[in-house]
Amino acid sequence: MQSMHSPQTQSQPSLLSARQVQTMLGVDRSTVYRMAEDGRLPAVKVGRQWRFPADRIEAVLRVDAAPRPASGREPAAAASVTVPAPSTEVAASVAQIAADLLGVMMVVTDMDGRPITEVSNPCPWFVERSDDPDLLDACVAEWQQLADDTDFEPRFTAGVLGFECARAFVRSGTSLVAMVLVGGVAPAGSTTTGLYRLDDEGRRRVLAALPKVAATLSRIGPRTPDARTSGRRTTDPRTA
């Protein structure tokens, strides 16, 4: 009887516990559970417990541990790999709805910090300076720094423009292909006018929703080519 079941057992994928994944990623257990819930980690429910396919977790670690040059950007050779990104139209729609509900600015960028969508729900401070040609360059430079931060957990950080931002990664399989960023949030004690002001509960709500928005875009899938993009590679945001 045992021999009849052994082939099935051998064919089943190896599953890791939350404790094992916690050790591998170097994060606390609650973070592992949140990443499983919102789709940032491949996981399945076995009874009431999360279990994680070992091969897919190892693939995630290989992607996230891949060496980058000093600039933080991917080497030129990597550009030959086509990685699908969310469609611009769908990403813009999702970002607009989420930004309005959360009361923040939101934008979707590629992994070089270049915007895929327009900034949704811009705060008055941003609108007043939208004609400044240096504003986008400053934003992209800041978004590049957020892309280089390997911490998966969204958190608010103050930037050079005087407001706070947070981000979550969009995945395609085990590859990071885009970011969802929120911004325009006034730091605690800031007297700058025209920024969005969130209380502690509002901040928690934004940070909890941000990975879910990113997971939604991850599940939606790649952009589809049309007559305007036919004949050139547009599925990789780094080569668009």
Image (cartoon, grey):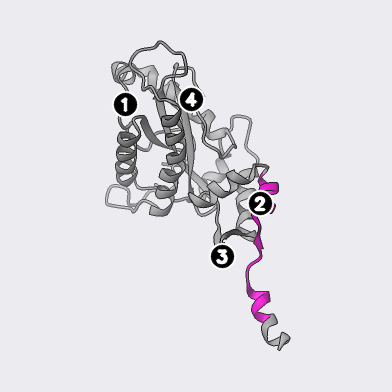
How far apart are the two marked residues, 3 and 4, measured between alpha carbons?
Answer: 45 Å
Classed neighbour count for the residue bearing mark 4: other residues with Cα under 10 Å, few (<14), some (14–19), many (≥20)? some
Q: Earlier in the sequence, mark 4 or mark 2?
A: 2
Name the spot of residue 233 as percent of width and height, x first: 41, 48
Residue visible at 65% across and 40% down in the picture:
67
Badge 1: residue crowd in 10 Å (few <14, some 14–19, many ≥20): many
**Where does label 3 land, which residue?**
47
> Residue 141, relative to residue 87: is it above or below?
above
Disc 1 marks a residue whose amino acid type is: Pro
Mark 3 or 2: in front is 3
Q: Tell me if residue 4 is in the magenta stretch.
A: no
Q: Which residue is mark 1?
A: 122
Identify the secondary structure beneath mark 3: loop
Task: Write the residue at 36% across / 51% down.
Answer: 223
- Relative height, residue 225 to residue 143 (above, below): below
Q: Position of residue 158 (x, y in %)?
A: 50, 21
x 69%, y 53%: residue: 20
On residue 141, the disc is: 4
Q: Mark 1 touching mark 4, by CB under 8 A?
A: no
Q: Which residues are magenta?
A: 7-25
Q: Earlier in the sequence, mark 3 or mark 1?
A: 3
Horizontal placement of 52 versus 140: left or right? right
Task: State how far apart marks 4 and 2 are (Cα).
Answer: 32 Å
Residue ID for mark 2:
21
Disc 4 + disc 2, Cβ < 8 Å:
no
